[in-house]
Each structure stands twice: as C-alpha cells, then as structure tokens.
Image (cartoon, grey):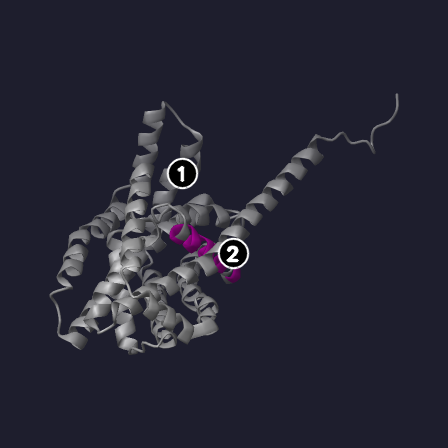
C-alpha cells in the first residue's frame, strides 16, 4: 500500500509538472508581480476556515470533556497539525487523523473517546464534502449552463457515494472496530500492543453514542460546511490579487468541484496533479485562463507549505519535549533517595 501511495504521488507530481511547464510563464510571472507581497495575507486568513472546522470537532468532544482539557486553542493546533500531515506528507489523507488522536490523548482523554470523535468527524466531513460538491456543481451549471465537462465529476461522486453510506451503516450496526480487533488478534496469535490501544468494543460504543445525538452531528456538519464555504474565499482573494477577479459564486463553484476531485482521488499525496488539472479544467468553464489557474494552484501550494511547515515543526518539537520530560521522570525515579539514606 505504501508503494502504491508513492507511485500515485510520483505520477501526480509528473502530471503537475507537465501542466505547469506548458503554461505561459511570462503571464504567470506578471500575475505574481501584480499580486506582490499581498499574497501573504492568505496565510493568516487560512486560520479562519480552520478554526470554524475545529469548532465542529469541539462540538463533538464537549460533553465528553466537561473540564475542557482539550479546549479550542489546543484543538486548533492539533487540527493544523492534522491538516499539515495530510497535505504535506505521503499518508493517504489518514495519517493526520492518527497523529491528531495521539496529540489529544496527551490531555488525559481516553483513547476511545478521542478516536470516536475523530472517526465521526471524518465521516461527517465526507457528508459535508458531498453537500459542498453538489452546491458547486449546481452553481457551475446555473452560472455557465454547461454540464458536459462536469459529467466525469458527477459520475465519480455518484460512483463513490455507496462508500460513505456503507460506512455509516457499518459504524452504526456492524461493530466494525470490535471485529477489526478480533481479526488482528487472530492474525497475530493473541493480544498485542495494537489491540490494547484499539479497544475495539469501547470505540464501537463511543461511535454508537454519537448516533444517538443527531442534533450534535448536525451542528458539527454545519460548522464543517461553513468552513468549506469560507475556504473558497482563498480562491476569490488570490485571483483578485493575481489580476483575474471572479465572483464569489464562481469561487465557491470552482473550489467545490476541485475539492471533490481531490476527494474522489484521495490516495494521491497532496492531490498532486489533481488540483492543478481540476483548476485548469473547471476554471476554463468560468472563463479563467489556464495560466491563471496554474498561478492560483501555485499560490495554494505555497500557502499549504507556508502554513503547514511550521505546524509540522511545532509537532516535532512537542514530541521531542515530551520525550525529554519522560526521560527526566524515569531518570529521577531511578535515582536513590540520598537525602533519606544514612551511613551504616
């Protein structure tokens, strides 16, 4: 599986390079000169949709963390690290969630509680993405009266729709993680460190408990959808700075359908080639030149690196700091109590 992810990443990178190389670099350079340093405003703005998305996660955790050990500021940092892992590392868009579970557990919350919230949050993100994609497709059809190019996206979304439906059913009725735990124990000949950490039966119960709170799930889904819509402002503002202004509705439409492509072809690390191809393809529908679409993609890539790299560094610093504290604690415990010892 790891090698397939690497292969998909290499193919995506090759496609992105081909798309970039075949554009008018003079026009792209002029667009960047037109925008100038104002493009840096995209870095702090990205915190807004990310914070809105984190509010949805906090809504899930709130009744299970009444003491607010994992408050919004801490979850915002964890959410930024999760996003950076999924966008900048070859982890097939799932490694960030595993890292997020580990980080929140540092606050003393049960692993099953944290993992249950992340599983449900990811599931609701799928639902929100389908709603957002449908909104984008309807906007593109309404704004351009054009549907031919969108057939592939519509077909891909329809073809992938059974996956979240089956997943919703299995998480509700299938005791998915208990079965996974039993399978791993059988394969490894008995309990292991992995199965102890998984605690499948409790995780299944945590997930089923969320199903009994439909209002809370709806609130989280609403926060997530609002985050997607706010994230479209990045497209609108970047193109405005680059000298290719479009309407807010155009920005929502192109962001939605491009995100849906990245969702359908999720196994390509960082959506390499997928984002570039989607922006060129769907940008053409609203009259956006290919060189402007590539310039927009480059801006988005730069923002991902500029925002995500410090988050990855902060995560590594936190891991190293925790290791140092653990080493000091073990060293202190191993030292003899010289103060209370008496010479014989």
- Provide residue 145's location: percent of width, then percent of height: 13, 74
Q: Is residue 81 magenta?
A: yes
Looking at the image, which residue sits at the far left?
A: 148
- The quarter in which the C terminus is drawn is top right
Task: Pick whichever, 241 or 342, lies toward us.
Answer: 241
- Provide residue 102's location: percent of width, then percent of height: 47, 45
Q: How many neighbours does mark 2 have within 10 angstroms: few (below 14), some (14-19), or many (20 or more)?
A: some
Looking at the image, which residue sits at the far front?
A: 26
Majority secondary structure of magenta residues = helix
- Mark 1–mark 2 contact, CB under 8 Å? no
The residue that appears at 33% across and 65% down in the rendered structure is 25
Q: Which residues are magenta?
A: 73-87
- The quarter in which the N terminus is drawn is top left
Task: Pick whichever, 293 or 163, lies toward us.
Answer: 293
The residue that appears at 45% across and 73% down in the rendered structure is 36
Q: Which residue is mark 1?
A: 198
Q: Secondary structure at mark 1?
A: helix
Task: Pick whichever, 68 or 52, lies toward us.
Answer: 52
Q: Secondary structure at mark 2?
A: helix
Q: Is residue 177 magenta?
A: no
Q: Is residue 93 above or below residue 340?
A: below
Report whether 208 appears left or right of 57.
left
Report whether 99 appears left or right of 94.
right
Residue 310's tag is: 2
Q: Quadrant of residue 222?
A: bottom left
Can you see residue 135?
no
- Provide residue 293's location: percent of width, then percent of height: 29, 67
């Amino acid at each position: 599986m790891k090698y397939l992810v690497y292969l998909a990443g290499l193919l995506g990178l090759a496609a992105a390079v081909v798309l970039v190389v075949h554009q008018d670099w003079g026009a792209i350079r002029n667009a960047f000169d037109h925008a100038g340093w104002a493009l840096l405003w995209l870095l702090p703005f990205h915190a807004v949709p990310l914070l809105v998305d984190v509010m949805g996660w906090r809504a899930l955790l709130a009744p299970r963390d009444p003491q607010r050990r994992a408050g919004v500021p801490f979850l915002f940092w964890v959410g930024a690290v999760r996003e950076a892992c999924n966008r900048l590392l070859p982890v097939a868009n799932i490694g960030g969630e595993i890292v997020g579970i580990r980080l929140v557990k540092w606050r003393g919350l049960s692993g099953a509680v944290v993992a249950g919230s992340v599983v449900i949050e990811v599931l609701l993100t799928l639902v929100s993405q389908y709603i957002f994609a449908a909104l984008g497709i309807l906007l593109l059809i309404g704004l351009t009266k054009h549907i031919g190019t969108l057939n592939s996206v519509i077909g891909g979304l329809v073809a992938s729709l059974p996956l979240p439906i089956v997943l919703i059913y299995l998480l509700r009725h299938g005791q998915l993680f208990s079965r996974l735990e039993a399978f791993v124990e059988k394969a490894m000949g008995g309990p292991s460190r992995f199965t102890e950490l998984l605690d499948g039966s409790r995780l299944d119960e945590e997930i089923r408990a969320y199903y009994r709170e439909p209002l809370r799930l709806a609130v989280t889904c609403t926060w997530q959808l609002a985050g997607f819509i706010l994230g479209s402002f990045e497209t609108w503002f970047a193109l405005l700075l680059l000298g290719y202004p479009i309407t807010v509705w155009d920005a929502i439409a192109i962001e939605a359908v491009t995100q849906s492509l990245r969702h359908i072809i999720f196994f390509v690390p960082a959506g390499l080639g997928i984002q570039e191809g989607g922006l060129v393809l769907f940008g053409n529908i609203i009259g956006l030149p290919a060189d402007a679409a590539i310039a927009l993609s480059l801006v988005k890539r730069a923002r991902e690196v500029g925002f995500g790299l410090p988050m990855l560094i902060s995560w590594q610093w936190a891991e190293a700091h925790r290791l140092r504290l653990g080493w000091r604690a073990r060293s202190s415990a191993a030292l003899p109590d010289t103060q209370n010892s008496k010479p014989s």
